[in-house]
Amino acid sequence: MDRTHVDGVMLPGLTDHHVHAALIEPERMLAAGVTTVVDLGWAPDDIWPLADRSRHDPKLPHIRAAGPFLTTPGGYPTRQEWAPPGIALEVDDPASAAQAVESLVAHHPVTIKVALNSEAGPVVDDVTLDAIVRTAAGHGIPVTAHTQGPGQVHRAHRAGVRVLAHTPWTEELDDKLIAELASDTTIISTIDIHGWGEPTRDRTVALRNLHRFHSFGGVVHYGTDFGNGPLPPGVDVGEISALTEAGLHPTDILRAITEKPLGMGAAADVSAVPGDPTANPAVLGRAITVLKAG
Ligand SMILES: [Zn+2]
């Protein structure tokens, strides 16, 4: 067995829980210490082969994919400039929703991604949303929602969606909803997409929501939405400082960005950083050694 000398701190591999891998160079994510990325929505012809390839290509991080979005006809993201054909399965009643979820199951999606963006077009109605969640749950697959527009977070939670792809930024959520979310829902942070370090209204609202969610004990996952925005692939130190701003301590940030602890004798993803991330989480952006399935 090879020996590796590392002058730094070894960590379980880093995970970015929200990317669009076909829009970035995923190899650069791995080189930066991100050994797993979660692709939250892309056209099946591109994303399933890429995810399959990531299983044995040592240059790629593990790519865990949702496949296409589920949305209503004409809903987000079907009219977005960046959206390729096949980006979404358009469903408009419980039967078509169930059928769409069933059609994805053979690809072992890591989650089912639903668009609830009422600012960009129509959204699925409650009975259709319920059918998506119910069918996915029947296969043990969680549902992740893009929620944007007044009331959409509440709708998602009521239906049983238990992962939010972004920290909500449309409105400041009331304490009752925040407490419910904190009890059973994971929020993927993606704060930095609002201004990329410049102060914006959406960033402020998202930070306030995440701060309360975290203080109520909610589970936060680090995610960047890379593929959307100007930053080069890697670790977004702006996202890490946003997590600090939202009240996460360095150990909370490590929990949000790392995979499960390393197991004795198990194949492991490892990232080594040049300093103690519990003292300075910004070192997470400067990986010096990365091992995928070492
Ligand atoms: Zn996204």
Image: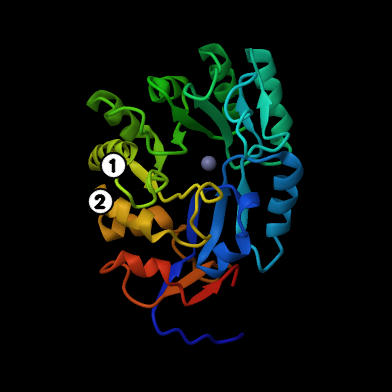
Please tell me in which quadrant of the rendered image residue 79 appears: top right
- Residue that carries the numbered disc 2 in the rendered image: 245
166 above or below 15? Answer: above
- Foreground residue, 250 or 87? 87
Please tell me in which quadrant of the rendered image residue 220 appears: top left
Give the percent coordinates (x, y) of residue 131.
Answer: 59, 18
SS assignment at label 1: helix
Q: Is residue 206 visible?
A: yes
SS assignment at label 2: helix
Binning the other alpha carbons within 10 Å of mark 2 as few (below 14), some (14 to 19) or many (20 upward) gives some
251 above or below 294? Answer: above
Whether label 2 touches label 1, CB < 8 Å:
yes
Q: Is residue 266 visible?
A: no
Please tell me in which quadrant of the rendered image residue 282 appears: bottom left
- Identity of the amino acid at label 2? Glu
Task: Tell me which residue sits at (61%, 59%) in the image.
Answer: 26
Q: Quadrant of the C terminus?
A: bottom right
Binning the other alpha carbons within 10 Å of mark 1 as few (below 14), some (14 to 19) or many (20 upward) gives many
Give the percent coordinates (x, y) of residue 271.
Answer: 48, 70
- Identity of the amino acid at label 1? Leu
Task: Tell me which residue sits at (31%, 56%) in the image.
Answer: 241
Q: Which mark is residue 207?
A: 1
Q: Is residue 139 left or right of residue 143?
A: right
Give the percent coordinates (x, y) of residue 31.
Answer: 56, 70
Q: Which mark is residue 113?
A: none
- The numbered mark, 2 or 1, whose residue comes first in the sequence reads 1
103 above or below 293? Answer: above
Task: Tell me which residue sits at (45%, 24%) in the image.
Answer: 156
